[in-house]
Amino acid sequence: MNKSQQAGFTLIELVMVIVILGVLAAVALPKFVSVDADARAAALNGVAGALSSGSAVNYASRKANNTKGVAVANCSDVEKTMQSYNGTPGTGLPSSSYTITAAAITADNTVSCTLTQSINGNTATTTFTATGIS
């Protein structure tokens, strides 16, 4: 009599692998969910840093030559210092999910301005520095 040998996994082995994968997925999923929030916070801080830097460069260039740069008399004017700004409000920021809270800035003074990010009902705020110049 000639018996052929069958190769493969038993049902118990397959169920155990599926259970182990399920446990690993349940443990790893919360870590990936928190990465999304961290990425949003990093993006917000990056935009705030760009606004602070743009304000400082604008102040220096306008102080050296008043025909260069733009006048900054309000926190919302700092958006105009961004390279992507084309004269339309909102184009100096990466997307419409970012807003700058208006606050007056007197010439040659530095103030702290508020930047807000609203994405899918989640709102976060941070601050950036702006220096006024006429």
Image (cartoon, rainbow, N blue to C red):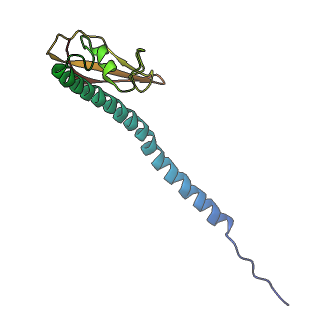
Say which quarter of the image contains residue 91: top left
Question: In which quadrant is the N terminus drawn?
Answer: bottom right
Q: Position of residue 31 (x, y in %)?
A: 42, 45
Q: Position of residue 119 (x, y in %)?
A: 45, 25
Q: In the rendered image of this protein, does residue 24 appear above or below residue 80? A: below
Residue found at the far right of this picture: 1
Q: Position of residue 125 (x, y in %)?
A: 32, 23
For the point 68% across and 68% down, which residue is it? 10
Q: Position of residue 34 (x, y in %)?
A: 41, 39
Closer-to-camera residue (102/82): 82
Closer-to-camera residue (35/73): 73
- Left or right of residue 95: residue 57: left
For the point 35% across and 29% down, which residue is it? 44
- Left or right of residue 4: residue 134: left
Q: In the rendered image of this protein, does residue 51 appear above or below residue 71? A: below
- Left or right of residue 62: residue 4: right
Say which quarter of the image contains residue 41: top left
